Image (tube, helix red, strand yellow):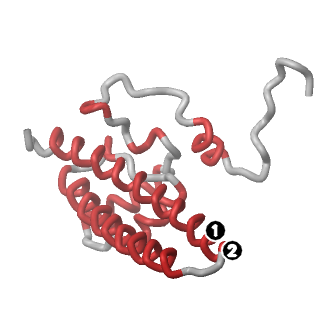
Amino acid sequence: MRKGESRPPSPALPLHDANIRHGPRHHSPSTTFGLTPAHLGSRLSKDDQAGIAERSRTGKLQTNKALERARANTMFDSKDAACVEITNIIEVDTRALGQETELLKSMQAVLKKSQTKELQDQINAEIVKVQQIDKRLEKTILSLKNDEAVKCGLY
């Protein structure tokens, strides 16, 4: 590679992973409370967004799906969502965050009891992953609550 040339993204990493490493390349001009919309990480397809909205309306949202999206950093973008959809998604994302918080506590308890460095290193690596998921969920919940306040007239 010559000096000054940029390296293409690694073919082993999907495009959204490149965004995770380098962050979003644009910012929304109107972010209330300093929050950025959840969609600035990786974006879900329109079909995925519509599927989540439909499951929200029909009461079929699942915490495991919210956690999968948090792991992949592809959180729901509420800009086209109805008030009730946002409210239901907040509820499920909050339950998912609670589950992950409990998991984190359990992992930290196991870490304290572990006796080998190899096991401690493995547990620490998993703890870091769970903390990242928790941060993504927290950020998304805050953004969704802001959108809910605006769309549902909760000011």
Percent coordinates x, y for residue 67 in the rendering:
44, 66
Q: Quadrant of the C terminus?
A: top left
- Which residue matches tag 1? 121
Indicate the amino acid at tag 2: Glu
Residue at the farthest front position: 115
Quadrant of the image containing the N terminus? top right
Quarter-of-image position of residue 2: top right
- Residue 108 is situated, as x and y percent measured from the top left of the image, at 45, 72
**In the image, which disc is placed on residue 118?**
2
**Amino acid bearing label 1:** Asp
Task: Look at the numbered disc 2 and give the secondary structure of its residue.
Answer: helix
Q: Residue at x 17, y 38 (%)?
A: 150
Judge by depth and name the residue closer to the eye, 23 or 104.
104
Identify the mark at residue 80; answer none if there is no mark.
none
Observer-nearest of 117 and 101: 117
Q: Is residue 97 left or right of residue 104?
A: left
How dense is the environment of label 2, judged by Cα within 10 Å: few (below 14), some, or many (20 and up)? few
